[in-house]
């Protein structure tokens, strides 16, 4: 995002001119006080939206239309329409990235949830939707440590969180209604600086996250939108700046197979299941064409196949980037025409506002193409109620400053951090530190007393923070030492004091890891180890420590901590991701056992050697023996790992058994495709030739908590398709989170959609269901199911 600085400042100036402090927002259009415009047909709330949109477009001149194609959309004063800034962000709370949102005055902050990679680790779709817009969410067990918070907590039917706060800020004139979140690119390479913003490396997990969070943000009031979300960046965008290659120049060479079974999946689920109101195309090229100029990607796939009901927006100035930086077209008019004809509806940046009119004059584009784009943007604005007159008289019009940073919103941010934190190692077990309560703890490390580090990027201004030191201080007496000046940890000047502290304390907690100086937008990592001399500090402190040494890691991307995993003096390791404004409380609650950890890694933790000969620019997911290429993510890479995808321990133990599941499933064919050879080849059925409706594999699993503590458990259901060169060696097909009290057992029903999840993609990008034995794995339990084609006894599977 954000390559045109001038444009950014222009946006800021426009915004500060239009928002004057505490005053409630004036109507965007169709002001009931304006007798000349309120009677126009596009203002009639009772008319169908398509009719209103057509009426409005019919009244606009070409010059006026062109100025609506950009994110800093101009006013149309003669029709009573104000200017609008489309660019706001709400990745994990209302953000101040983008000129559409401004904190200050009545809105000094907003609830800052954990960074997405952490929230994803909860594997709890209910939580993801609750963050966007809480339905009824349950309060965690009464927490005696924070009686004050509990007094203010009330369970409301409509505990809407991010979208409540966004609407409240919109009503107050300090935010927009169009949010370019979530980021659901696949976390393909562990070095990616923006991996932290994503739900991880698995396509199905990312797709489920996308659909849940988008539903939460957009609400479920029929066609009406509470706020409009956008899934980005479509597609194969997961490199920022590595070894001299940046996203503005990168041409991702991607196979049809990887597009269909990896890169498309989260976006398809976002559009088709989440019903998102927008998709953003990316800066990079895919197979030689900038995504924002590719009609196959925009018009054919997103709008044609997936039936997006919404608008397609460019990344910020990405149309300018493919003209100026990639030299994809020889004139700016061609660049503008290519984008709009490919299906782009809105430009983040000034480019289309400057060059579209002359593109029409040169005959590169017709006014009808522009109308088609405006239908998509104006329809979203109407679904948001922006043409319905007075904001205060609308469904979300009552929301204001009192609805932002409420105690229950902040409690949910804390709950999200508790659910997302992952226990990687617990030797002994040495955690929880219940016996250390009220005793002395050395708290050491560059991340031990941080605030903004905990909220990661695309954040806003938090309501307030609890640092790890403060959180731990609620349970024990603390001795604090930084150990390193910052995460870069260039020298050992502060080591001595840290070592002394650990000698005196009953336990030592080292809070280490990364921050935005190491991994960020425009900054991919060079390696996977802890930066600078952090590792040395950890080892030296652990050698001196009188009590157990616990390592807490803050980071978005995975870190190679093999040294700590293997070191018996390091008793336990916790990964907190970037845990949000309440991160310190959540970390302490887990360390001292007030909460039982249940998070699981949403990405593979590779050893440093993995990246030695692996260019980030190489997109292939599948390994290649001849090229000595290891493949990417747990689905394809089979080499050594530090911690695998899905790893995460608990203070209790769970066992599962498959209680009930079919051993044979017949896949009905639709019979419309004549020759059987067209339907079945290579012992697999083309998904488009099967009757997929409601064809599910129902599995019932008993989960027993055999330990002594209550806990939440994530059932990760993987399948291994019959052997064949197309297939991943295993893939996530379902997951379900359950809470099971100590000693209790719970039955969990899981329905696996056969066509969606048991299919694999062949080399030409065609999805097929392999016939034969599929192995379903749940933890250590395996169940085998045989798939065959129904009604075709003669066909040998
Ligand atoms: C169908 O495929 C089989 C095996 O691949 C082949 O022997 C047969 O000739 C094919 N039949 C038709 C009608 O193409
Ligand atoms: C999922 O999250 C919701 C919202 O925080 C919570 O009420 C629920 O208990 C969580 N589920 C499990 C199994 O932990």
Image (cartoon, rainbow, N blue to C red):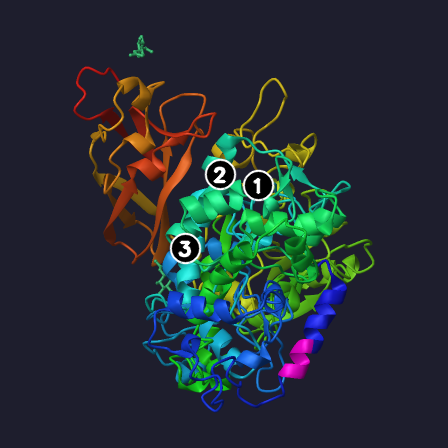
The C terminus is located in which quarter? top left
The reply to whether the residue tagged 1 has its Cβ within 8 angstroms of ligand 2 is no
Q: Is residue 672 magenta?
A: no
Task: Identify the image quadrant of the N terminus.
Answer: bottom right
Question: Can residue 428 be seen from the camera position used here?
Answer: yes
Q: Which residues are magenta?
A: 14-18
Question: Label 1 vs label 3: CA separation?
Answer: 20 Å
Q: Is residue 481 left or right of residue 186?
A: right
Ligand 2 is in which quadrant of the figure?
bottom left
Determine whether the residue tagged by mark 3 lies in a helix, strand or loop: helix
State which tag comes first along the sequence, 2 or 3.
3
Residue on which disc 2 sits: 262
Q: Report the residue marked by disc 3.
A: 211
Q: Residue 447 occupies which quadrant of the picture?
A: bottom right
Residue 769, x across and y down, in percent: 33, 29
Separation (CA) of disc 2 from disc 3: 16 Å
**From where the camera sits, is residue 542 visible?**
no
């Amino acid at each position: 995002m954000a390559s045109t600085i001038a444009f950014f400042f222009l946006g800021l100036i426009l915004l500060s001119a239009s928002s004057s402090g505490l005053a409630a927002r004036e109507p965007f259009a169709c002001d009931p006080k304006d007798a000349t415009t309120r009677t126009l047909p596009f203002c009639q709330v009772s008319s169908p939206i398509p009719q209103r949109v057509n009426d409005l477009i019919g009244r606009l001149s070409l010059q006026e239309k062109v100025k609506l194609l950009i994110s800093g959309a101009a006013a149309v004063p003669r029709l009573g329409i104000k200017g609008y800034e489309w660019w706001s962000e709400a990745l994990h709370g209302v953000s101040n990235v983008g000129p559409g949102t401004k904190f200050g005055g009545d809105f000094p902050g907003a609830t800052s949830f954990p960074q997405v990679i952490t929230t994803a680790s909860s594997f709890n779709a209910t939580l993801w939707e609750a963050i966007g817009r809480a339905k009824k969410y349950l309060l965690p067990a009464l927490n005696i440590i924070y009686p004050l918070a509990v007094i203010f907590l009330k369970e409301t039917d409509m505990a809407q969180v991010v979208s409540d706060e966004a609407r409240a800020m919109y009503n107050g004139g300090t935010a927009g209604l169009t949010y370019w979140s979530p980021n659901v690119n696949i976390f393909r390479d562990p070095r990616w600086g923006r991996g932290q913003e994503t739900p991880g490396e698995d396509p199905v997990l990312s797709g489920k996250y996308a659909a849940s969070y988008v539903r939460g943000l957009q609400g479920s009031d029929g066609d009406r939108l509470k706020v409009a979300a956008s899934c980005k960046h479509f597609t194969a965008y997961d490199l920022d700046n590595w070894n001299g290659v940046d996203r503005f120049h990168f041409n991702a060479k991607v196979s049809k197979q990887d597009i269909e079974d990896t890169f498309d999946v989260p976006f398809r689920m976002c559009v088709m299941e989440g019903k998102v109101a927008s998709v953003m195309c990316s800066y990079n090229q895919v197979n030689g064409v900038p995504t924002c100029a590719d009609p196959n990607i925009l018009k054919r796939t997103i709008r044609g196949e997936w039936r997006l009901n919404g608008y397609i927006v460019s990344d910020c100035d990405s149309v300018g980037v493919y003209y100026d930086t990639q030299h994809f077209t020889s004139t700016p008019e061609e660049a503008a025409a290519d984008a709009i004809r490919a299906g782009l509806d809105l430009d983040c940046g000034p480019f289309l506002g400057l060059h579209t009119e002359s593109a029409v004059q040169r005959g590169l584009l017709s006014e009808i193409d522009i109308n088609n784009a405006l239908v998509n943007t104006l329809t979203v604005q109407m679904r948001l109620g922006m043409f319905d007159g007075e904001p205060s008289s609308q469904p979300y019009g009552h929301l204001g400053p009192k609805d932002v940073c409420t105690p229950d919103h902040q409690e949910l941010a804390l709950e999200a951090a508790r659910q997302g934190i992952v226990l990687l190692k617990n030797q002994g077990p040495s955690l929880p530190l219940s016996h250390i309560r009220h005793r002395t703890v050395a708290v050491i490390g560059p991340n031990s007393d941080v605030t903004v580090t905990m909220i990661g990027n695309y954040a806003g201004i938090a309501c307030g923070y609890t640092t790890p030191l403060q959180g731990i201080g609620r349970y024990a007496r603390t001795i604090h030492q930084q150990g390193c000046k910052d995460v870069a940890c260039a020298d050992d000047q502060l080591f001595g004091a840290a070592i002394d502290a650990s000698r005196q304390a009953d336990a030592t907690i080292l809070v280490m890891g990364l921050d935005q100086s190491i991994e960020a937008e425009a900054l991919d990592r060079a390696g996977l180890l802890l930066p600078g001399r952090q590792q040395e500090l950890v080892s030296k402190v652990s050698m001196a420590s009188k009590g157990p040494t616990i390592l807490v890691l803050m980071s978005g991307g995975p870190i190679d901590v093999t040294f700590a995993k293997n070191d018996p003096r390091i008793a336990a390791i916790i990964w907190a991701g970037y845990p949000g404004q309440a991160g310190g409380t959540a970390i302490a609650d887990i360390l001292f056992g007030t909460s039982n950890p249940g998070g699981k890694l949403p990405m593979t933790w590779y050893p440093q050697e993995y990246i030695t000969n692996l260019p980030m620019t190489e997109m292939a997911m599948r390994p290649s023996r001849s090229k000595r290429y290891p493949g990417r993510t747990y689905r394809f890479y089979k080499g050594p790992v530090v911690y695998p995808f899905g790893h995460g321990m608990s203070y209790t133990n769970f066992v599962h058994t498959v209680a009930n599941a079919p051993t044979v499933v017949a896949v009905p064919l639709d019979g419309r495709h004549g020759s059987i050879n067209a339907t079945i080849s290579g012992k697999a059925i083309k998904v488009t030739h099967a009757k997929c409706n409601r064809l599910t594999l129902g599995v019932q699993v008993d989960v027993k908590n055999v330990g002594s503590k209550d806990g939440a458990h994530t059932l990760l259901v993987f399948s291994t398709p019959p052997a064949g060169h197309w297939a991943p060696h295993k893939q996530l097909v379902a997951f379900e989170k359950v809470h099971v009290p100590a000693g209790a057992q719970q039955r969990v029903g899981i329905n696996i959609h056969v066509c969606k999840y048991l299919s694999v993609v062949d080399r030409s990008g065609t999805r097929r269901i392999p016939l034969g034995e599929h192995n379903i794995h749940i933890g250590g339990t395996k169940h085998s199911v045989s798939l065959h084609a129904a009604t075709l006894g003669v066909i040998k599977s």
